[in-house]
Image (tube, rainbow, N blue to C red):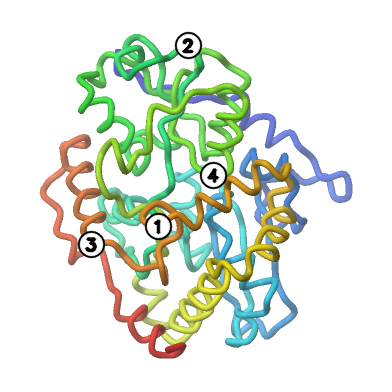
Amino acid sequence: MNKVSTGKTLRNAIEADVDSNNGKPATNPRRRFMLQSSALALGTLTNISPAMSQNDLIRVKAFPGAQNLPMWVGLEKGNFSARGLNIELAFTINSDELRADIAEGRFDLAHAAADNSVAIREMTGKDSVILMGGDSSMNELVVQSDIKTMQDLRGKSLIVDAPNTAYALQAKKALSLAGVAESQYQVIVVGGTGLRYQGMLKNPNYSASTLNPPFSIQAKQAGFRSLGRMVDLVGPYQASSMFSMRKWVDKNSDKVERYIAAWITSLRWATDPKNKAEVIEILTRQLKLEPSIINETYKYLLEPGFGLEKDAKFSEVGFKNLLTIREEIEKSKPLNPIDFVDLSYYNRAIKLIN
């Protein structure tokens, strides 16, 4: 089987979502609006930009999801502005879009699976560099309710963001370890996590996908089944990370260090249990979901070894496993971790706040 196709229905729905004020599609990266729950689920874009000097602007692109908690805290608490930074944030609908925007310089920093940075280098030859960790992705392999085991996915479909990077490779590895060959299921490209969750809701033939909070929690409450956490199925994995193009980093090293310092300050505040009530309020404002999902999401985010990594520390073990999975599934040449990571900016940023 081993066929890759593209799920267009949800993407078309997004592109048809027109802003009544200016007639532009919701996915236009220049459109500014506050994130609504439907927009979060479908992965549309948002920009949040405090009124500060254009010289201090950093354009950031990320996937929608609870992993953005440090960003939301940093913006609401003024941690970025305190470091003299003006943040413009946009949410992407898929990895292809995010990688292209970073590689072509339309955005400066990305928060996404580290494997996307690897893919930029491997696919384009351009020098993308990982600067900081984040979390394990908190992914689970979520399936339709009639799927009981991995083996039940033979002849079924796996829906993914991009077929050759990150969480798609995680899922393929998990299925391979369970004895299910890639030739035995169909791979369907749909887009980011929110799009995949919506796709599974609308189409029962979309059998399985990797989902993370809040979408994984919504899915289970809607009756879907989890076949397990990806870190349990395939081992440690360096997922959410911050990366950029080396050329931009070299020209903006001071900005990068201040950004990382603001992020870690925000992360420390967000993961301090004494701030739980206010963190819940922030998650509620940003995700616009019911309390049961918000409370469960909070638990995921603070779970050691699964949720947000302390100080966004980069996992060397997780990254080596990521490269091993890429080499095996994509049949790539052996990859040296040193070629893809530069933690010198992170180390200097830590000194700014310690």
Residue 267 lies left or right of residue 198; in this view the side is left
Q: Earlier in the sequence, mark 4 or mark 3?
A: 4
**Towards the viewer: 128 or 350:** 350
Q: Which quadrant: the N terminus?
A: top left
Disc number at residue 304? 1
Local packing at callout 4 (Cα closer than 10 Å; few below 14, some 14-19, many 20+) is: many
Q: Is residue 190 above or below residue 47?
A: above
Residue behind mark 2: 146
Instruction: Compute the Cα span from label 2 to label 1.
Output: 31 Å
State the image quarter where residue 250 is shown: bottom left
Task: Give the mark, 3 or 2, whose residue is nearer the N terminus.
Answer: 2
> Which type of secondary structure does the marked residue at label 1 adopt?
loop
**Image disc number at residue 316:** 3
Q: Looking at the image, which is closer to me, 24 or 310? A: 310
In front: mark 4 or mark 1? 1
Q: Earlier in the sequence, mark 4 or mark 1?
A: 4
Q: Secondary structure at mark 4?
A: loop
